[in-house]
Amino acid sequence: MVKNLTKESSCNWDWVDVTNPSADDLQEVAQKYNLHPALVQDSLQPDHLPKYELSQDTVFAIIRVFDKEVGVSGDTVQDFTNKIAIFYSNSFLITIHRTPYSFLDEIEKSVISKNECEAPFNLFILIIKEALTSFEQPGLKLAADLDYFESKVFLRRTQHYPLTNGMYWLKRKAEVSKRVLNLSKIVLDNLSRENQNDPYIQDIRDMYLRLLTMYEEIDNSTNNLLTIHIGLASQRTNEVMRVLTIFSVFFLPLTFIVGIYGMNFRYMPELESHYGYPLAMLVMLMITLGIYFWFKKKEWL
């Protein structure tokens, strides 16, 4: 669907918003605004990564927006984010995307509907800012999830695999989001190079650095937590093996004595002794106590 959002405003330039476009829709828009065919083809690719190009007097950029509907099993850039392709010059701004975005409607209501016709470049800056802002709440949620998993690891005994799976998906989301932000740097670098003293661009760079730092910290902290969790799980396994080993050391000599007296030979002098049974029990008790005090001396208990 192709809409000219500035058609009924006092703006002297066009903002054309194209939602879920067909090839014919894009061809018509490309012919009207003289867009390069290769760039139009890039705008049709849903998995295209962020980029920034200048063709004659038209800037073409691709930015990615965090998908709020992403499921827990997503693990790629395409699963977590959606693409917006943008063309702009002094006389037009074209936004191309497959799914509707509420922040585009808000920009249209707050700027265009009020006839506050700023230049297409200013709207381009607003769109980039909103795209980066879409990563903020997911990042805060990941930080809260990280705190939850941290308390589970250190304060509670939980099953190993469900906790590991949850931390893996958290780590994966942080990695993918960090990758998208790193790739988006090319857009900010080109904007900064062309408009070095623009305070709006500096604000966006500050936001970008804050978001990138947040996701890097989440990624690093999750890696550390996974390492600690696996180490604690190994420690618990070692503790179980230690207890089982101690029990086996206690019962090994007792089993040896029982095995000797269980051979049922006819001529065994202890069997006819009046004190044979209590003597055997006393010997086993002394062996058990001897092992116990030896373990205590070695600080194994």
Image: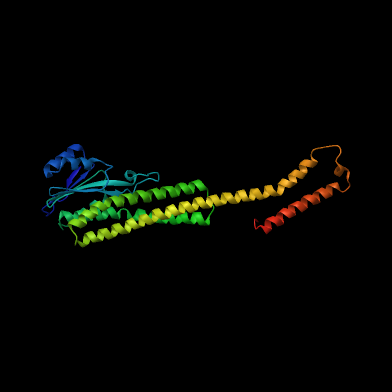
Q: Which sits in the foreground, 205 or 234?
A: 234
Residue at 26% over, 58% down = 205
Residue at 16% over, 53% down = 120
Which residue occupies the extreme left position in the image?
Answer: 12
Q: Which sits in the foreground, 173 or 7?
A: 173
Query: How many marks do you count on the picture?
Result: 0
- Quarter of the image holding residue 45? top left
- Quarter of the image holding residue 32? top left
Instruction: Decide: is 45 above or below 149.
Output: above
Q: Can residue 156 be seen in this view?
A: yes
Q: Can you give x and y, in whole percent of width and height, for residue 261 in the image?
A: 80, 41
Q: Can you give x and y, in whole percent of width and height, for residue 236 in the image?
A: 56, 51
- Quarter of the image holding residue 270? top right
Q: Is residue 128 left or right of residue 278?
A: left
Q: Can you give x and y, in whole percent of width and height, for residue 109 in the image?
A: 21, 54
Q: Quadrant of the N terminus?
A: top left
Q: Is residue 109 visible?
A: no
Q: Which sits in the foreground, 184 or 131?
A: 184
Instruction: Decide: is 116 above or below 253.
Output: below
The chosen color scheme is rainbow
Q: Is residue 117 left or right of residue 258?
A: left
Q: Can you give x and y, in whole percent of width and height, for residue 194 in the image?
A: 17, 56
Q: Which sits in the foreground, 264 or 37?
A: 264
Q: Quadrant of the C terminus?
A: bottom right
Residue at 39% over, 53% down = 219
Residue at 44% over, 50% down = 167
